[in-house]
């Protein structure tokens, strides 16, 4: 999120940085489901299962050995995420609008989508202290992450669920923009692309 509370997704194509913005601000103290898809040069940003905005981007993505950063922006380092993240999924193909709606409405005990999650971090872990692979990947692909903590953030909150009830959710990750803590995981390597 930027300083105005607008959701921003950006990435490096190798020659350009490209960005997609939500058209409004996210509400404070309210859980918001966010989904992003990219296929054939078209980007789609969804909020709470509904399409929010689209954009075109023809440069393609830059795949490299750098880790995916959740809750942190490496440039500039002062622009991170402040808030709570209940779970983060990364899929092997772009989700359709109906897939996104199903994921937004799903809870842990329900199938989340017809697509296969490459990585699924539920942030239900008992605690994080910087130990390698402590942010558990529930997909079965062993793409575990590591919390990089600054002044105690990010951390896990197990005192109250993100969504109460049965079925509900468990814990969530707490992030603080001012402290620049984040979760890191290597999802892709150039060696894997050559196979």
Image (cartoon, rainbow, N blue to C red):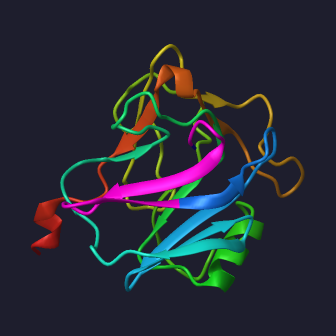
Q: Position of residue 20 (x, y in %)?
A: 50, 62
Which one is nearer the viewer's eye here, 174 or 117? 174
Q: Residue at x 88, y 55 (%)?
A: 166
Give above or below for 39 relative to 148: below
Give above or below for 180 relative to 41: above
Q: Which residues are magenta?
A: 2-20
Q: Residue at x 50, y 73 (%)?
A: 37
Give above or below for 156 relative to 37: above
Based on the displayed image, in which of its 4 quarters is residue 158 positioned?
Answer: top right
The quadrant the C terminus occupies is: bottom left
- 17 inside magenta stretch: yes
The quadrant the N terminus occupies is: top right
Based on the displayed image, in which of its 4 quarters is residue 132 positioned?
Answer: top left
Q: Residue at x 38, y 81 (%)?
A: 41
Q: Residue at x 40, y 25 (%)?
A: 130
Give above or below for 169 relative to 179: below
Q: Is residue 127 visible?
A: no
Which one is nearer the viewer's eye here, 191 or 57? 57
Q: How many marks?
A: 0
Left or right placement of residue 6 versus residue 78 in this view:
right
Q: Position of residue 52 (x, y in %)?
A: 67, 70
Q: Position of residue 151 (x, y in %)?
A: 50, 13
Left or right placement of residue 81 versus residue 18 in this view:
right
Based on the displayed image, in which of its 4 quarters is residue 153 positioned?
Answer: top right
Q: Position of residue 193 (x, y in %)?
A: 16, 71
Q: Is residue 94 visible?
A: yes
Which one is nearer the viewer's eye here, 1 or 166? 1
């Amino acid at each position: 999120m930027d300083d105005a509370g607008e959701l921003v997704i950006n990435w490096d194509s190798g020659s350009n940085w490209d960005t997609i913005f939500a058209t409004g601000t996210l509400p404070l103290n309210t859980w918001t489901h966010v989904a992003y898809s990219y296929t054939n040069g078209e980007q789609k940003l969804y909020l709470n299962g509904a399409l929010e905005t689209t954009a075109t981007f023809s440069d393609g993505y830059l795949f490299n050995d750098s880790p995916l950063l959740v809750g942190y922006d490496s440039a500039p380092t002062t622009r991170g995420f402040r808030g709570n993240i209940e779970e983060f999924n990364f899929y092997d193909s772009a989700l359709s609008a109906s897939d996104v709606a199903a994921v937004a409405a799903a809870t842990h005990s329900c199938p989340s989508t017809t697509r296969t999650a490459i990585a699924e971090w539920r942030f239900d872990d008992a605690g994080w202290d910087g130990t390698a692979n402590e942010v558990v990947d529930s997909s079965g692909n062993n793409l575990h992450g590591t919390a990089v903590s600054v002044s105690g953030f990010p951390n896990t909150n197990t005192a109250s669920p993100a969504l109460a009830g049965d079925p509900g959710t468990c814990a969530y990750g707490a992030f603080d923009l001012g402290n620049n803590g984040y979760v890191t995981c290597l999802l892709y390597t150039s060696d894997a692309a050559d196979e």
